[in-house]
Amino acid sequence: MPAIDQLKQCVALKEGFDPSGDNAFAVIKTSLDFRRLVEQVHRDFPAINESRVAFTTTDKDIIPEGLEYDPANDSFYLSSLYHQKILRIPHDGKVEDFAPNPKEHLLPVLGIRMDPSNGTIWSDSSDEDAGKSELLHFDRTGRLLDRYPSPENSKHEFNDLVVLRNGTIFLTDTIANTVYRFDVQTDNFTPVRTSRELLFPNGIALAGDEDVLYVADQLGVLRIDLKVGTSAEVDPGPHSTVAGIDGLYWHKGSLIAVQNGIGTPRVAAFRLSADGLHVVKTTVLANFLTTPTTGALRGDDFYFIVNSQVDNLNGPHILDITKLQPVRIAVVHLP
């Protein structure tokens, strides 16, 4: 069977790929060969969970995608794809509306980032089916300050973003396979040149000095030198992979990743070499997860969405309301 043969090749690499949690293999999951492959993967990569649940929402149909931490008020911001709005989670854990949708008619909301210069909030919003996207800007009360539509030359899906101290924004466009630089002074989206073509870019992280950008796509991670405009592939090292990353974050010389494109999702820390081009150590922090998407740093703790339930959403419709569960936000202390 071709599928089993290809899976054997993947498993033999021992890079962390686990087909057991991927619905793409549903038709062969009952076969003996598939079960043996999964058993081998679980011997090579046993269950790890260094996290604990920090918050649980009351509402089940949020279908969150983005998460951000605001140190000024010790709160988290959580985006909702289904309700097309942003929620706030104060330190007491009680979820409240921050930027409700009905008034502004927002598109589904994805990545969220604080502006380090003034504490305002930027967010990506996208309608994947229509190919429309907007970059949104909110003040600290949740009032919409401005909205910037995507270029009209093709379909777009603004996904995740980072904000520099000077106000410049870099964001990933998953449908257009592009990273954009957004200049708030001119309202222009400028494509960023990369050393190879991107395949569904998603997670994006800014190194501490703001001179380096890391961009994740289905194939791996690119390191982009913002000073000279060059980019290069990050080498994952033996028996490791940086492919299939959704949420991507920089923490003290490591990339913290929510990997949900490698079969069964996991959260991992990738310690980088001094030049930022090689993974010298991979630490799995939590695996055997369901539908994690993104996270947020709070000091040396990483908070992440455990069960976004995005697989239960088709455009504006929830497929099966009986399968919805309260959304869990977990936290793990970083190595």
Image (cartoon, grey):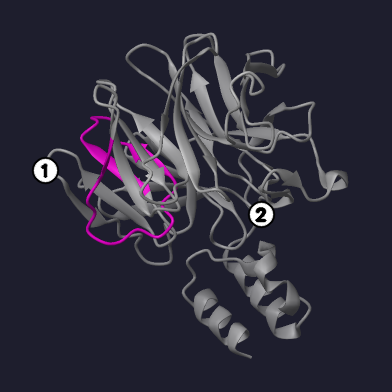
Q: At which x and y percent is residue 241?
A: 43, 61
Task: Tell me the residue that label 1 is attached to.
Answer: 228
Q: Is residue 34 left or right of residue 159?
A: right
Residue shown at the point (11%, 43%) measured from the top left:
228
Q: At which x and y percent is residue 234?
A: 30, 56
- Residue 209: within the magenta? yes
**Badge number at residue 163:** none
Q: At which x and y percent is residue 233?
A: 27, 58
**Badge number at residue 288:** 2
Number of labels in the image equals 2
Quadrant of residue 94 in the image?
Answer: top right
Residue 161 appears in the figure: yes
**Which quadrant is the C terminus positioned in?**
top left
Instruction: Classify mark 1: helix, strand or loop.
Output: loop
| Image: magenta residue range | 189-215
Q: At which x and y percent is residue 217?
A: 41, 55
Outermost residue on the bottom side: it is 1
Q: Amino acid at mark 1?
A: Val
Q: Is residue 84 left or right of residue 227?
A: right
Outermost residue on the left side: it is 228
Question: Callout 2: few (<14), some (14-19), or many (20+) C-alpha neighbours within 10 Å?
Answer: some
Majority SS type along the magenta span: loop
Outermost residue on the right side: it is 322
**Considering only order in the chain, which callout, 2 or 1, is on the residue closer to the N terminus?**
1
Compare residues 40 and 28 and report the one nearer the observer: 28
Residue shown at the point (76%, 35%) measured from the top left:
61
Residue shown at the point (54%, 82%) measured from the top left:
6
Q: Amino acid at mark 2?
A: Phe
Q: Nearer the viewer, mark 1 or mark 2?
A: 1
